[in-house]
Image (spheres, grey):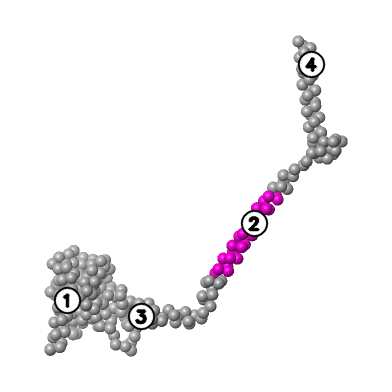
């Protein structure tokens, strides 16, 4: 048994020696330095060189594509955008202020007869939904309404527009609400004060109050006692269409008085 084990061990040792010799031959052959290099040719694959070639082959087309895209983008901006600005600034400005494209601000045209309106609406921005309904009802009755938002155009001064509306409107329709009396903004206070002055100077009743549902007589009195003594139309009693009809009757009677006065 010991003899057989020794033989197996010697075989394994011989096999191990052969593997070591084969490995050494492979290394020396691959390096081209061994005596068996010609007998045992081995192709050397340069993995580093191959990887470099592959990366270059990928990057070159990518850079070319990016460069082409940038050139096309610059060409687009040059031919389709920059060309439109080759005109002189004067021609561009003249095009913008062309009367056919934009109506001139009549409030800034001092040498022409100012526009006149039937009613000026004094309100706060919080009531804009109700104001819009009231305005549409008045327009349906062919009443000329001054509405600052409609009168403002590019370059107009707001105070001048408001001043013209107050001066050249027959009546001032004041929409009183909880927001109106509590907010007491600069513009509404100025407009209301101007309407009071107009009434005194013209010796006519120019203020037409409209009370919304959310305001009380006490709140109106605390805000402006003179408004309590002026006959008002109330939202809880009349619709906007009925108010428009009432104003139309008032305008007709005033026109009749002027004609036969």
Alpha-carbon distance for marks 2 and 4?
65 Å
The residue where tag 4 is placed is 7
> Along the line of sight, which residue is nearer the eye, 56 or 189?
56
Q: How far apart are the alpha carbons under marks 3 and 1?
A: 29 Å
Specify the segment rendered in magenta.
52-77
Which residue is pictured at 76% across the width and 14% down the height?
5
Give left or right: position of 15 versus 141. right
Quarter occupied by residue 101: bottom left
Sequence-wise, the earlier of marks 1 and 4 is 4
Q: Earlier in the sequence, mark 2 or mark 4?
A: 4
Q: Which quadrant, please, contains the C terminus?
A: bottom left
Closer-to-camera residue (68/119): 68
Circle number at residue 129: none
Question: Percent from the top left, x then y, of residue 52?
Answer: 70, 50
* Residue 131 located within the stretch drawn in magenta: no
Of badges 2 and 4, nearer the viewer stands: 2
- In this orientation, which residue lies closer to the viewer: 162 or 28? 28
Which one is earlier in the sequence, the residue at label 3 or at label 2?
2
Q: Residues within 10 Å of mark 2 (few under 14, many from 20)?
A: few
Whether residue 36 is situated above or below residue 81 in the rendered picture: above
In the picture, the disc for residue 247 is 1
């Amino acid at each position: 048994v010991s003899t057989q084990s020794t033989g197996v061990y010697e075989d394994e040792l011989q096999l191990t020696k052969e593997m070591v010799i084969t490995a050494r031959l492979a290394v020396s052959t691959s390096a081209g330095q061994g005596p068996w290099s010609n007998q045992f040719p081995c192709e050397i694959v340069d993995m580093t060189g191959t990887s470099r070639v592959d990366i270059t082959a990928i990057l070159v087309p990518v850079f070319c594509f990016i460069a082409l895209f940038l050139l096309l983008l610059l060409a687009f901006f040059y031919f389709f955008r920059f060309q439109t600005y080759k005109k002189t600034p004067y021609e561009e400005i003249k095009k913008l202020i062309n009367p056919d494209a934009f109506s001139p601000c009549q409030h800034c045209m001092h040498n022409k007869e100012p526009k006149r309106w039937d009613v000026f609406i004094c309100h706060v921005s919080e009531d804009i939904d109700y104001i819009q309904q009231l305005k549409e009802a008045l327009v349906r009755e062919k009443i000329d309404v001054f509405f600052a938002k409609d009168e403002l155009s590019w370059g107009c001064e707001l105070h001048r527009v408001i001043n013209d509306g107050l001066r050249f409107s027959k009546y001032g329709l004041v929409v009183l609400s909880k927001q109106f009396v509590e907010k007491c903004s600069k513009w509404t206070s100025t407009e209301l004060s101007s309407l009071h002055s107009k009434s005194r100077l013209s010796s006519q009743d120019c203020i037409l109050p409209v009370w919304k549902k959310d305001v009380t007589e006490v709140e109106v009195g605390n805000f402006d006692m003179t408004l309590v003594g002026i006959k008002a139309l109330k939202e809880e009693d009349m619709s906007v269409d009925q108010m428009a009809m009432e104003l139309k009757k008032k305008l007709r009677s005033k026109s009749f008085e002027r004609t036969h006065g």
